Image (spheres, rainbow, N blue to C red):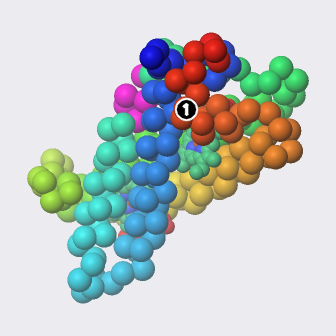
């Protein structure tokens, strides 16, 4: 059986689909855990677990981002339907590249905040990443503010992104959603 690993002009290949859905699940989980952690007080028995899970998932997202963005740069996305107006193409581009930027800036600001606060990062209980820089609480506070603003931006972009996918599927009735969602597609050669 031949598998369509790369994107074609019509559909996403298996690698892009896998990256998209694995990272989407990780981002949603990191967001929810971050919120739960924020609502937990320091003395709570779950505090350290939530902190470690949140930071570990975030670091995993940053790690996957490096490979995903390289794959994206050497492997262009399928074309939008021909009749898509210019302003919608522009909005889709801003949202997609905005989401890529957030996948990088969120973990980066979070790691920066932890290190500047002098807090080591416990990666899934496997190993500890000590802060390599001197403690600077002022910078840590600023980076936390940035992290908060980025989480709000992520939520807004994510909602627009999902609404747009649903609009394509139920209103325009095109295959924008299925070319990303249907992971059986890359296994059918006729879609080339
Ligand atoms: C894509 C990855 C990430 C997402 C989506 C994310 C999201 C969140 C969310 C939703 C919160 C709760 C506060 C709020 O609603 O603004 C939060 C808090 C926090 N996150 Fe992240 N985060 C990510 C990665 C990281 C990483 C990698 C670290 C550190 C290694 C980190 C460190 C923190 C810290 C220190 C806080 C608490 C801030 C405070 O005490 O107010 N985050 N994050
Ligand atoms: C669970 C809800 C989600 C749905 C239904 C969804 C749906 C889609 C669809 C249908 C596409 C393809 C668009 C096209 O064909 O032009 C897409 C692409 C994309 N999605 Fe999502 N998505 C979801 C979650 C996420 C999350 C959480 C992120 C990251 C924060 C994300 C980031 C992206 C990016 C960056 C692209 C562009 C891929 C490319 O480079 O071509 N998505 N999404």
Nearest the eye: 174 or 132: 174
Above or below, 99 against 75 in this view is below
Residue 171 colored in magenta in the image = no
Q: Quadrant of the N terminus?
A: top left
Q: Residue at x 20, y 54 (%)?
A: 123
Residue range in magenta is 65-70
Q: Residue furthest front?
A: 1
Q: Residue at x 40, y 66 (%)?
A: 33
Which image quadrant for residue 51? bottom left
Above or below, 66 against 26 in this view is above
Residue 136: percent from the left, percent from the top? 25, 59
Quadrant of the image where one finds ligand 2: top right
Residue 42: percent from the left, percent from the top? 27, 82
| Res 136 seen here | no
Q: Residue at x 83, y 20 (%)?
A: 82
Q: Which residue is mark 1?
A: 184
Residue 96: percent from the left, percent from the top? 62, 36
Q: Quadrant of the C terminus?
A: top right
């Amino acid at each position: 059986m031949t598998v369509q690993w790369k994107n074609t002009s019509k559909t996403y290949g298996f690698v892009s689909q896998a990256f998209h859905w694995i990272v989407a699940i990780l981002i949603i989980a990191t967001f929810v855990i971050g919120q739960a952690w924020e609502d937990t007080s320091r003395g709570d028995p779950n505090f350290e677990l939530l902190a470690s899970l949140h930071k570990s998932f975030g670091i995993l997202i940053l790690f996957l981002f490096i490979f995903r963005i390289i794959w994206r740069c050497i492997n262009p996305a399928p074309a939008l339907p021909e009749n898509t107006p210019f302003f919608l193409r522009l909005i889709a581009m801003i949202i997609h590249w905005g989401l890529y930027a957030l996948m990088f800036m969120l973990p980066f600001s979070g790691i920066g905040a932890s290190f500047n606060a002098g807090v080591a990062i416990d990666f899934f209980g496997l190993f500890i990443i000590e802060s390599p820089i001197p403690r600077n609480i002022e910078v840590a506070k600023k980076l936390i503010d940035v992290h908060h603003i980025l989480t709000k931006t992520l939520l807004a972009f994510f909602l627009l992104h999902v609404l747009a996918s649903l609009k394509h599927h139920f209103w325009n009735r095109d295959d924008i959603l299925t070319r990303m969602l249907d992971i059986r597609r890359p296994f059918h050669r006729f879609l080339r």
